[in-house]
Structure formats: structure tokens, C-alpha cells
Amino acid sequence: MNKKTVLLIAFVLSCVFANAQHVGSTPEYIKTLTAEWKGERFPDGRPKVSDAILERLKNISIEEAWGVLRNKGFMNQFEGDWTIINPGEAMTGRVVTAQYMPLRPDLEKQVKEQGKTENRAQKGGTNSWPIDMLTTGDVYVADAYGKIADGTLIGDNLGNSIYAKSQRGVVFYGSVRDQEGISEIKGFNGWIKGSDPSYIQQMMLTTINAPIRVGRATVLPGDVVLAKKYGVIFIPAYLVEDLVLTSEVTALRDEFGHLRLQEKKYLAGEIDSEWSEEIKKDFLNWLNNYPGKLPMTKAELDKYMKERNF
């Protein structure tokens, strides 16, 4: 092996190890993780799913979203059994991830040193670092390995900072403190595994905007989260628009089917199986004369119906 080859290998390895030391993932790494996304991105590399799609997503049920994802081969995107700060409100947003681990002093030292090179705040705890990165429409999602006592990632002060930056809230596989104060932050919401009066200790931040596990789900930075009363779904950014439209059409099909069953026009077995040509024509006519406001544009609906065999 010649000298140039040895130097090249050494250079490549040094780049690999340098990248591995980042606390926050580089834009290039995030773009690699989310390569299927072809649209606009934030400066940090995360996909920029439109605000309009995020708003429409709020009306999609967990079951509808879950069904679309499973049909596309995504079996591990749901987590349930949450304590919800404001249970009556749904939340959608673009994910910023953070991972926490039990404290190991030598690793924590490296994380803090690397934080200096990344110009992260040196006052306060590292649990403020993900918050500093939030922008409007972001949801702070953290894997805190289910720690409750001494695992409280935020209190009402950090909760206020999160809402000021994101106009959203959090999804924590872990806990918070000052839950009463947090619940009084107008507009803020949170899906958490518990609360405790203790403060965070014997745990450390390890990564920001890297892949994390949230219970049963694998979550990437730039995913879109749908958080509702009955659970949380994490959706790959490139699938969100199709998922919303598919789920909206499914909801319209259900509305039509329920109406016709109530009218006793068709038998339950006819509606609950593959539709006959007669029912399909009836459904299309019903859509063309829909009594309310369709959730999608007519152009979106027409294109969808042409491309799908329902």
C-alpha cells in the first residue's frame, strides 16, 4: 500500500470520527437520513413540510394514519399510553430529536467540550440545547429512556421558552416537573410518561437531531408528529402529504358508508367489503355534491380518484 493510499484512508477515518463526535447532526447527515424528501429544507437539513399540510393533519385519526403507514411497510411508528398536558387538543409539527442517557462522567465531559465547538450555551444544563434550536412549527421529541424521578427534562421556565420558539410543545419518553405551571402556558401541549417534583440529575444529553427510539417507534429528525388523545404517530416527511390525502378520502368513504347504512340503502356486507360498481358510482356522485367543505381541493381529489382503484 503506497503512502498516498495510507494518507487517504487516514483522512477518511478522521472525517468519520470527527462526524461521530457531533452533538447536533450535520445538515449533510440529516439530508442523508431523509433522502426520500425532495422538497424545501431548513438550514439544519430537516425537511420543511408545509404549514398547510400540518394543519390538515390535525384532523386525521390515529387509526387512519397508522393504516396508511402500515400499508407502506412502516410498522413501528406508533406509541401510546401517554400523560397529556391538555388532552382535548391535537398537536402536529416537525420533529427535533434529542437523546438522553444515564450519566457517565467521561462521556458527559466530551459532550460538553463538543458543545463548545458547536457554540452551544455553556450556562445551564445541556437539556436546554435542543430548545435553543427550535423554530416555529417544531416539536421537541426526546428519548429520556422513561425516567421519571430525577428525569424531568423541563419545568415551566423551559416550557415557556419552548412555546415562544415553536408555538408547539413536546413529546417526551420521560418526565417533566412543574406540570401545573406548564399546563398554564396557553397553547403549549405535551405528551409525557409522567411528572415529578424532582429536578434532572444523573442523566445527560448525547445527541440532537439523530435517530431515536420513542417506546415502540423509531423517530428521525424532520419526521412529522401527529399527537392526539389516543396516541402519537411519527410520519416520514416524504409520506405526509400522501398520508393526509389518503386519510381524508378514507374519512369521506366512511362518512358516505355510514350515511347509506343509516338510510338502509345497502347491506352492511356490501359497504364493509369491496364495493360494487353501483356503490362506486353512488360515492362519486355523492362527492360531486358534497354537502359541506371538502378537506382537500377538488383538483387534489380528482387526481387521487383517477390514480386509485377504490
Image (tube, grey):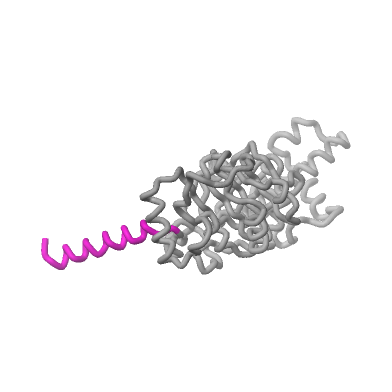
Q: Nearer the viewer, residue 88 or 2?
A: 88
Locate residue 68: give its quadrant: top right
Of all residues, the one furthest to the right in this rendering is 263
Q: Quadrant of the C terminus?
A: top right
Residue 285's place in the image compared with 277, above or below, is below
Our reading of the magenta stretch's main secondary structure is: helix
Q: Nearer the viewer, residue 114 or 57?
A: 114
- Please state the horizontal and vertical placement of residue 108, each as a whole percent of the image: 41, 52
Residue 18's place in the image compared with 141, above or below, is below
Residue depicted at x 63% and y 38%: 80
* Count of labels in the image: 0
Residue 191's place in the image compared with 48, above or below, is above
Residue depicted at x 78% and y 56%: 294
Residue depicted at x 52% and y 48%: 219
- Please state the horizontal and vertical placement of residue 142, each as a whole percent of the image: 55, 49
Q: Quadrant of the N terminus?
A: bottom left
Q: Is residue 224 magenta?
A: no
Is residue 215 visible in the rendered image? The answer is: yes
Is residue 241 visible in the rendered image? The answer is: no
Residue depicted at x 61% and y 40%: 193
Q: Which residues are magenta?
A: 1-23
Q: Nearer the viewer, residue 162 or 286?
A: 162
Residue 153's place in the image compared with 42, above or below, is above
Of all residues, the one furthest to the left in this rendering is 2
- Please state the horizontal and vertical placement of residue 106, each as a whole percent of the image: 36, 50
